[in-house]
Image (spheres, rainbow, N blue to C red):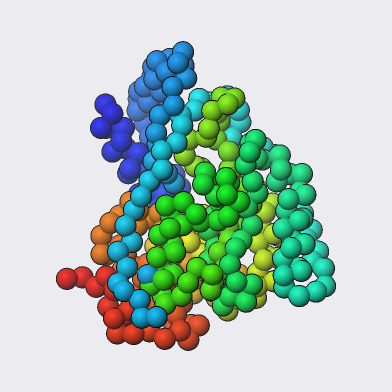
Amino acid sequence: MRATLHALTEELRRLKTAGVSTVSVSEESLATLRKIVADRAAAVAPAQAPAPAATSAGEPAAPSWTPSSTPRAASKPAKPAAATLPPPPAVNLPDGDKQTRWDALLAAVKDDSVCAKQLRPGKQVVLGVGSLDARIFFCGEAPGAEEELQGEPFVGPAGQLLTKMIAGMGLKREDVYIGNIMNWRPQLPTIDGVEQVGNRPPTPEEMAYCLPYLRAQLEIVNPDVVVALGSTAAKGLLGPESFTTLGEIRGKWQTFAGKPVMVTYHPSYILRNQSNRSKRMIWEDLLQVMEKTELPISDKQRGYFQSR
């Protein structure tokens, strides 16, 4: 049964990465799943035992883009996953240089009572990091467990992989700007005192609330190009009904806030799909970004992850 559930979970993850948001499940299958969940909850509830769960390239050398994982504690439903939010805030940046305006934006996010309400004890809101003069702005969807602890986007396994991808472009992490649409980690139900297991995509309402803060970051940084990492980030920028599957728009230029947007897969896609074909798809999108921003591209870079 464990192997079956694991296979089911991996397939659902693959579908989500491909942009599929709904699947058809029979009533009989739902009944079976409910029984499994109920039996498992009854077995672990007395001990409240934690259990690990999987988480959410000079002339550079060819990147390997290898995965890693971080164990997390188990949880049990007890709270609603997403609350009703007020209208999105109006963000008014002060006059001044980029750093002054960014500092004011960070203070506004930290003072936002709605953002603060979404945090569990000891966790932080997350704003973007990197060069305020960056020409490339990488945009993800939401912080994960490592990010809400450190208050910085893309520091977990997917973030480490993104750093390698940036290095493959001949850049350093500090040369670009990296942010998320969301300023907090979307909550999943837990029991008090137990860490959240795994992540869930933010709701359209949650993304709409945080979007003014992302627009403000774009206004400050004023990049040449935005790279949307994954289906959720792309829908947050382009609209929830803008596409059905990521394959429809991946590798094609879009527009957000007057900026060209390249949509590609999230780095976590490579963590689950360790094939040259998967890596090459993302790399082809990044090559387009390099061409758009007039970065030098060597023959070696053009040949990364070619089928052998």
Residue in the picture at 39% in, 41% down:
54
Q: Percent x, y for residue 8?
A: 32, 37
Above or below for 299 versus 73: below
Residue 160 makes an appearance in the image:
yes
Residue in the picture at 44% in, 70% down:
166
- Location of the N terminus (image quadrant): top left
Q: Percent x, y for residue 191?
A: 56, 24
Residue in the picture at 47% in, 19% down:
48
Closer-to-camera residue (287/116) = 116
Closer-to-camera residue (210/193) = 193
Residue in the picture at 32% in, 79% down:
301
Q: Percent x, y for residue 212?
A: 71, 60
Closer-to-camera residue (273/239) = 273
Tell whether 242 sits left or right of 164: right
Above or below for 193 versus 221: above
Tell whether 214 sits left or right of 290: right
